[in-house]
Image (tube, rainbow, N blue to C red):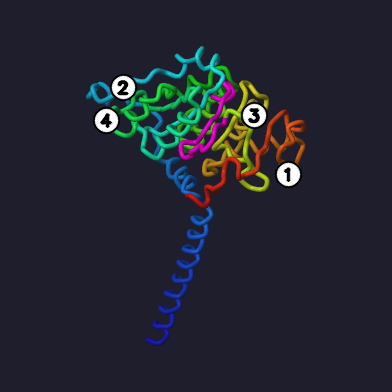
Amino acid sequence: MNNKFSSSRLANILKWCIIFIIIFGIVCLSVSRLSKASLYGIFNIFTVEFDDASMRNLNENSQDYLLLENISQKESELIKTSLKIFFVQTSKNEDIISRHACSIEAAARLHPNGLIFVLMRSKYIHLKKGSYLHLRSYNNIHFTHFDEQEIYRGTSLIKLNKTKRTQFIHYFAISHMSDFIRTTLLYKYGGIYFDLDIIPLKNFQIFSNAVGLETDNGVNVAVLAFERQHLVLDLQMEKQLESIENKFNALCWNCLGPLALTQVLRNVCDQHRLRIHEKDKCLEIDIHPSYVFYPISYQVCC
């Protein structure tokens, strides 16, 4: 009887060990195939709160904070200026960390005749934290606030504010909001967009309607250069809305950015596999090899 009990217990332990090994293997494989950005995006689906309560902090200790102008107040300047570079901070952070400041400063130094716009979701910036005091020494760097619902005006993404699903959109990952905002900015004003973890090493004024491959057959959206109201951006916004209205996979951190733009380019270029430097076939979009914009893959660095 004891032998049967021992055998049954041993079999049960072995079964649970096998289950644990299988689950552990699946988790390890998943993590190895996801960048930190993916994990961060998944985490934020459940934790990001998009209701802006930043004014409470400003009123409590106003001498430490600077109230930012809304990007809409720069409308005429944005349209008139030929060279514009955008950085967007879609988190609630009230300061600029040194790593991001390095990217902003590099852009400012390399483009002294351009305007560098740093858009923040926070309505204010902390004067004594982060790198603001250093960055404000550059006359061409402008910190502004963006209101998510207001910034979509003048684009098809205004529908995000009118649909029944608007309440859910506010709880998507931060990366999804970033994809909406960058597409909107470039469509409305034209210019160059950099992710905050991109450090430019050369002047980008030579690039117009330019994207870079990340893989053999897919573009990244960490660096983009577009003229105002380019059709490809309009088509990307339609693709983004289509993804939202259909069965949207909120865990797919790149569906509204790299994948959406890749699909649009395949359609307009009439190419199953994207080919570099064929502007005449791609509505004047110049697709660059990965080493031009992304010499180090995000999967390596992150």
Report the residue marked by disc 2.
Answer: 66
Q: Secondary structure at mark 1?
A: loop
Disc 3 or 4, which lies upstream in sequence?
4
Q: Nearer the viewer, mark 3 or mark 1?
A: 3
The residue at 41%/27% (across/down) is 121
- Sequence-wise, the earlier of marks 3 and 1 is 3
- x and y percent of residue 221 in the render? 57, 37
Determine crowd level at label 2: few under 14, some 14-19, many 20+ residues with C-alpha closer than 10 A.
some
- Tell me which amino acid carries mark 4: Lys
CB under 8 Å between callouts 3 and 4?
no
Left or right: where 139 falls relative to 240: left
Work out how far the residue at label 3 is from the one at label 4, CA to CA, in angstroms. Answer: 38 Å
Rendered image: mark on residue 273: 1
Instruction: Name the element at disc 2.
Output: strand
Q: Does residue 190 belong to the magenta stretch?
A: yes
Q: Which residues are magenta?
A: 185-204
Question: CA gap, disc 3 to disc 2?
Answer: 35 Å
Q: Which of disc 4 and disc 2 is earlier in sequence?
A: 2
Q: Position of residue 275 (x, y in %)?
A: 72, 41
Residue at the image position 51 percent from the left and 23 percent from the top:
161
3D distance between C-alphas at marks 2 and 4 = 10 Å
- Check residue 79 for magenta coloring: no
SS under mark 4: loop
Instruction: Decide if residue 124 is on the left or right side of residue 159.
Output: left
Residue named by callout 3:
209
What amino acid type is highlighted by mark number 1?
Arg
Going by the numbered disc 3, the residue's amino acid type is Asn
